[in-house]
Image (cartoon, grey):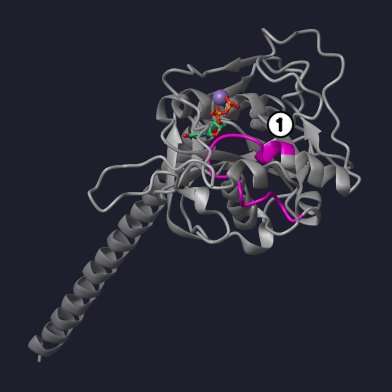
Amino acid sequence: MTKIPCNNMGTYNGRRSKFNFTQFLAIVITVMFIITVVLTFNLLTSDHCKCQSQDVSMEQIRYIPNKLAPYASPYKLAVLVPFRDRFEELLIFAPYIHNFLNAQHINHNIFILNQVDRYRFNRASLINVGYLYTRSNYDYIAMHDVDLLPLNKNLSYAYPKRQPFHVAAPNLHPRYHYEKFVGGILLVNREHFGLVNGMSNKYWGWGLEDDEFFVRLRDANLNVTRPVNITTGTNNTFRHIHDKNHRKRDTTKCYNQREITRKRDRQTGLHDVNYTISSIKSMTIDDAPLTILNIELICDHKLTPWCDCAEKKPDNKKISITKT
Ligand code: UDP
Ligand code: MN
């Protein structure tokens, strides 16, 4: 009889002590769980904070001008650089112009229009391709030689709202001083470049495509404006990285190129530039981000046979064809 209560008690006591132990275990597990959760949360939070502050400081180091003062202008500039085989110049140009534009708080991107076909260089067609590629995302273009660096910080690259703006003005350019010169560096807004049907596609080899563009602008009543109140001159407003023996200008003329390219071209332009973009690459030179468009221009040999002046004879000897 006594065993029963004892047993009962024992069982009861046993159950109670089991219950207490389970309860104890549950409490310990819960407390440990809470501690773990709190610790993990703290660790995550502090890591997250560290990452963020690290990112911000890295960004601040790279883009100080943009971070300290947001872009003064809401307009986006596509810097279009016609390019072939000028890598040494590009290494200097890209970081320089990136910093120069950042200092003016110009929201910009640099596009290297790399001509990869085997025809003669065609600066104007490359600019047409660059414009077509960027026009839906950019408000204005800078047609920019890779070997010309603006030295005077007062040369503005601001949005040219009413008229194209010729940065490399003839009274400042180191080499070209005639009034109608619009080469080197020219800012044109998207609407104006479209209005004149871009540039002519007939200019293979060096020269005159910019003079023809001047006439297009004039015919559309667009008179270029130029920098004013610049105290530097032709020797110290720009750096022209161009050794004429090392970077020979392709002045060859063949077929009736000379005659045709002296005339205003009402036939070709943005609407008929024939090309493929074979690939697009991104790269960074120092802190300057670049987009490289590898462009294959396609020549209409009937219209502009001078896209290749050095045709091959059957015996594989090159001949230079002169004007016919
Ligand atoms: N260019 C190029 N590769 C060439 C020829 C020209 O990249 O083989 C580009 C480059 O941007 C250069 C611009 O076209 O700055 C104008 O050519 P160049 O410097 O020969 O003309 P310049 O204004 O000095 O007479
Ligand atoms: Mn040059």
Q: Residue 166: percent from the left, percent from the top?
A: 77, 30
> In front: 154, or 84?
84
Residue 39: x percent and y percent? 37, 47
Query: Looking at the image, can residue 243 be seen?
Result: yes
Q: Is residue 310 left or right of residue 19?
A: right
Query: Who's the residue at 66% across and 14% down the image?
Result: 174
Question: Measured along the vertical axis of the image, is residue 66 above or below residue 213?
Answer: above
Q: In front here: 32 or 214? A: 214
Residue at image location 59% in from the left, 45% down from the top: 257
Q: Is residue 63 left or right of residue 200?
A: left
Task: Check disc 1 and report the residue beneath it.
Answer: 105
Question: Label 1 sits on what residue type?
Answer: His
Q: What is the chief secondary structure element of the magenta stretch?
A: loop
Ligand 1 within 8 Å, label 1 CB = no
Category of crowding for the residue at label 1, using alpha-carbon neighbours closer than 10 angstroms: few (below 14), some (14–19), many (at least 20): many
Relative to 251, 312 lies left or right: left
Q: Position of residue 23 (x, y in %)?
A: 29, 69
Q: Position of residue 31 (x, y in %)?
A: 34, 57
Q: Using the rendered image of the protein, determine whether residue 136 is visible from the camera's viewpoint.
A: no
The front one of 56 and 40 is: 56
The part of the chain drawn in magenta is 197-211
Q: Quadrant of the N terminus?
A: bottom left
> Residue at the location (66% across, 44% down)?
259
Where residue 150 sits, quadrant-wise, is top right
Give the quadrant of ligand 1. Answer: top right
Q: Magenta stretch: residue 154 in it?
A: no
Say above or below: 82 vs 293.
Answer: above
| SS for dot 1 | loop
Q: Up-down: is 56 above or below 292?
A: above
Q: Is residue 202 magenta?
A: yes
Please tell me which residue is depicted at 87% across the width and 47% down the height of the picture. 219
Farthest residue toward the front? 324
